[in-house]
Image (cartoon, grey):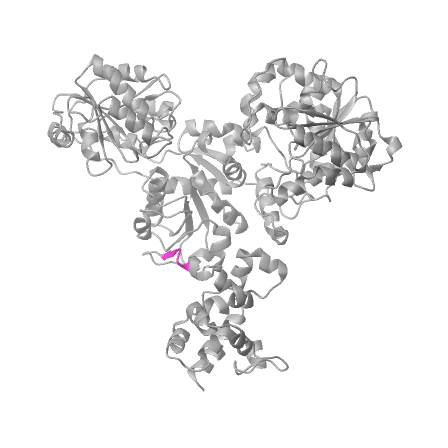
């Protein structure tokens, strides 16, 4: 028996060997796949050689042994787990990475051999290239911790992640997953068993064979930007804490904040100031902030000092670097990447202000990032620096690149000016305090403004963004007093130990668990039909902690409304979808805003309700579109009133303006408001959602929805589709103070139900109340507008409140069998 036969017998499963003891002979009645492929595909053996990773088989192929490539083909064709054990090909991975192949039920390996390798489709080789073996040996007798970082750069959050990995390695197996690579790769490898760089951990890590990835006990996601790991952790039921350094003000897209808030077992913030920026978003998902969040600074504050000799030596070296004698000046330092967020421009302004008042006060910034070709910042900052004479020996502003001069800058400096516009807990402040520097920063700009830090007496805050106030405070500070260098006292617990303990404590106190499917199967993380088991896990995770971004079932909605004590919520109810005869519908007018006209003709054909409206008013933004609309509606016997209006206010402002004095709404009482949001660029999910809204409101080509019949009840003012997702105020929360004082009562903490998608039936009195709320001449924002957070997004959420103000109820019609996404 040859070595090739030995490989076949050692790798093929028993049931395969029983039928095929010789890999060269196909099953009875079948042709040899390898022979057929060999005849069809030029270079087949080279493709198989490139795929093969099993050393013995690779060697046999390289030596030209007959049938070696045949064996490689047959082993890979066996599928999981043999395929990935002998090659860079995995049937399961190929299906996961290319859903089109899975949906078409095409054999993945045959597709790759016939087409995939020529098309450049990925194999396990691309994933294995992203895997790096660490220098720590996996120990099955201790826990395994996954630490996720968004990148491996030498910046704030990744450096904290490295510290976590270094400490964790003393007691645990550590695996690190980074969304992107960077210069810290080798530093991380010293402390881990395995490290993977992947933008899609859920789709990648499953196909790695290292034991460490199969036995992860808990995880720490270091930064909200590590959000791609949420999907993986939920699917593997791995408990995790997220250590959050970022403000929501600059965390986009907003889904990063939402997913982190929904699925973290514990949210840990580097400062209370950072947590405050998250408060509204946590309330949006009904997170218990007291129970499920903690404050843990990444480092303790060490008040240190520098000896007289150290200060003198540092100043001598700094003098040599900048060409200015620093022996007797007041030295103010700043540090970090040069950018708007770090306020480097404000640092320069403070230097200008101080130049006239005290020419012996010098400002020195150390950091990289100034690119004079960068139109976002570098061009303007470079010009600014040239105009004020930065770097000239007779001036007072100097810049140094990041590097070995950093310790000397801190030792030489009397104070650090943290000019950042928004900066959580920059590590440079810890370093500056340890070097005996005093700190000036803006009120409301950093976690170092927390009372726990200000109590040190070394940190002073001034009016936000005011360089004059900063300059005055800096000139008022005492100079650095030489003193003995102080060695940092050993920490009882490092950051990793504190995070781990906090997470385990939170898990130990959990008393409420949810298991099993729910009535509403709407996805948050897992959108494919075949991922139903993962959708169950994501709902279980949310419901376990009482967090919400979708409803569990209709009973939960009814219970919540029955228990509601807010004046808006008491006027909400849900109702099942039904059909109606045309004679049962109340008289109604229909408004369509058709900025896009792509699907209007199709909508008119598909929905018989168009032919039931007493009037059809269409708004659009050009005469060309107006003519197109008249023509396509005339083709089905409809004669709309088409009004040309500027494209302002998305779909809702054109609708509201119909109800202004003298507007086209006239005396018509009941209106249906629709819009054409589809364009050639919209996604399939957006089209499905729009079809969902229209189906519930209007019915279809053959039948009419009974949604409008609820308005036969004079106590109903609004009818809209029930959305299975629990949509909160989101970014609109920031606008509530503008309108809340003009409403008859306090707005609820979350709206619960509103016409998501802004399509509905409504009474004219409610629309006029909405106009009154904002008033004549309101300064509406102009297009283009952001995806959330404008008055137009707020209006969508306020319709039930305005109906309640008019003494009217809002009805939300549910049809759970209608696809929403």
In the picture shown, does residue 7 fall above or below 594?
below
Quadrant that contains the C terminus: top right
Looking at the image, how many numbered discs can be counted on the residues? 0
Residue at 53%, 67% in the rendered image: 114
Residue at 54%, 28% in the rendered image: 784
The reply to whether the magenta stretch includes residue 129 is: yes
Viewer can see residue 567: no
The reply to whether the magenta stretch includes residue 62 is: no
Image location (x, y in percent) of residue 729: 59, 28
Residue 160 vs residue 181, the one in the foreground: 181
Image location (x, y in percent) of residue 478: 21, 17
Viewer can see residue 88: yes
Magenta stretch in the rendered image: 128-132
Image location (x, y in percent) of residue 391: 20, 27
* Image side of residue 224 versus residue 762, left or right: left
Image location (x, y in percent) of residue 376: 38, 31
Residue 338 vs residue 327, the one in the foreground: 338
Quarter-wise, where is residue 317 in the image? Answer: top left
Quarter-wise, where is residue 346 in the image? Answer: top left
* Image side of residue 7 versus residue 409, left or right: right
Quadrant that contains the N terminus: bottom left
Residue 18 vs residue 179, the one in the foreground: 179
């Amino acid at each position: 028996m040859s070595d090739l036969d030995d490989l076949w017998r050692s790798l093929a499963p028993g049931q395969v060997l029983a039928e095929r003891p010789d890999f060269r002979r196909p099953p009875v009645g079948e042709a040899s796949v390898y022979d057929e492929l060999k005849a069809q595909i030029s270079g087949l053996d080279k493709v198989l050689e490139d795929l093969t990773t099993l050393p013995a088989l690779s060697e046999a192929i390289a030596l030209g042994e007959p049938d070696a490539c045949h064996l490689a083909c047959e082993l890979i064709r066996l599928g999981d787990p043999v395929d990935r054990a002998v090659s860079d090909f995995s049937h399961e991975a190929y299906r996961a990475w290319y859903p089109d192949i899975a949906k078409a039920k095409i054999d993945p390996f045959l597709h790759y051999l016939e087409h995939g390798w020529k098309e450049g489709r990925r194999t396990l080789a691309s994933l294995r290239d992203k895997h790096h073996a660490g220098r720590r040996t996996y120990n099955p007798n201790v826990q395994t911790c996954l630490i996720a970082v968004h990148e491996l750069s030498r910046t704030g959050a990744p450096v904290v992640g490295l510290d976590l990995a270094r400490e964790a390695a003393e007691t645990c197996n550590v695996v690190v997953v980074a969304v992107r690579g960077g210069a810290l790769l080798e530093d991380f490898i010293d402390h881990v068993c395995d490290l993977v760089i992947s933008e899609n951990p859920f789709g990648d890590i499953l196909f790695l064979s290292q034991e460490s990835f199969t036995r992860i006990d808990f995880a720490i996601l270091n930064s909200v930007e590590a959000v791609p790991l949420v999907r993986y952790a939920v699917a593997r039921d791995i408990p995790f804490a997220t250590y959050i350094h970022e403000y929501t003000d600059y965390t986009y897209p907003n889904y990063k904040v939402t997913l982190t808030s929904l699925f973290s077992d514990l949210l840990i913030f580097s400062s209370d100031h950072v947590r405050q920026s998250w408060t509204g978003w946590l309330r949006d998902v009904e997170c218990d902030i007291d129970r499920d969040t903690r404050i843990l600074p990444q480092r303790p504050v060490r008040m240190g000092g520098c000896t007289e000799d150290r200060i003198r030596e540092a100043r001598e070296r700094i003098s040599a670097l900048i060409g200015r004698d620093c022996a007797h000046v007041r030295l103010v330092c700043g540090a970090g990447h040069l950018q708007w967020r770090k306020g480097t421009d404000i640092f320069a302004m403070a230097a200008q202000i101080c130049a006239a008042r005290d020419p012996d006060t010098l400002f020195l910034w150390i950091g990289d990032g100034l690119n004079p070709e960068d139109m976002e910042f570098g061009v303007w900052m470079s010009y600014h620096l040239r105009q004020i004479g930065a770097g000239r020996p007779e001036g007072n502003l100097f810049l140094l690149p990041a590097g070995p001069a950093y310790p000397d800058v801190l030792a030489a400096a009397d104070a650090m000016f943290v000019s950042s516009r928004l900066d959580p807990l920059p590590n440079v402040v810890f370093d500056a305090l340890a070097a005996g520097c005093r700190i000036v920063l803006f009120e409301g700009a950093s976690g170092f403004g927390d009372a726990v830090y200000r109590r040190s007496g070394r940190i002073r805050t001034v009016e936000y963004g005011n360089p004059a106030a900063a300059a005055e405070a800096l000139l008022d500070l005492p100079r650095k007093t030489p003193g003995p260098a102080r060695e940092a006292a050993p920490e009882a617990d490092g950051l990793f130990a504190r995070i781990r303990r906090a997470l385990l404590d939170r898990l130990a106190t959990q008393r409420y668990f949810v298991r099993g499917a729910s009535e509403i199967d709407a996805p948050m993380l897992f959108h494919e039909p075949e991922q139903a088991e993962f959708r169950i896990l994501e709902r279980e995770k949310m419901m376990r902690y009482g967090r919400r971004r979708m409803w569990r079932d209709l009973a939960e909605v009814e219970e919540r409304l029955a228990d509601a004590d807010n004046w808006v919520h008491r006027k909400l109810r849900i109702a099942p979808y039904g059909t109606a005869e045309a004679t049962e519908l109340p008289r109604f007018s229909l408004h369509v805003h058709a900025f896009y006209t792509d699907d209007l003709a199709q909508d008119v054909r598909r929905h018989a309700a168009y032919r039931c409206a007493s009037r059809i008013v269409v708004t659009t933004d050009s005469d060309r579109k107006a003519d197109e609309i008249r023509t396509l509606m005339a083709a089905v016997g409809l004669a709309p009133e088409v009004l040309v209006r500027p494209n302002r206010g998305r779909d809702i402002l054109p609708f509201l303006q119909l109800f202004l004095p003298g507007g086209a709404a006239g005396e018509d009482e009941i209106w249906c408001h629709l819009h054409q949001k589809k364009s050639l660029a919209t996604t399939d999910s957006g089209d499905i959602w729009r079809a969902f809204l229209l189906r519930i409101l209007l019915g279809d080509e053959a039948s009419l929805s009974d949604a409008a019949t609820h308005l036969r009840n004079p106590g109903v003012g609004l009818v809209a589709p029930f959305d299975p997702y629990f949509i909160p105020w989101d970014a609109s929360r920031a606008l509530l103070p503008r309108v809340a004082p003009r409403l008859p009562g306090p707005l609820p903490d979350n709206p619960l139900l509103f016409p998501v998608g802004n399509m509905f039936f409504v009474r004219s009195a409610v629309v006029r109340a909405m106009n009154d709320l904002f008033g004549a001449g309101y300064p509406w924002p102009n297009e283009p507008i952001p995806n959330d957070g404008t008055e137009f997004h707020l209006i969508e959420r306020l319709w039930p409140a305005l109906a309640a103000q008019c003494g009217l109820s809002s009805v939300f019609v549910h049809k759970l069998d209608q696809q929403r996404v």
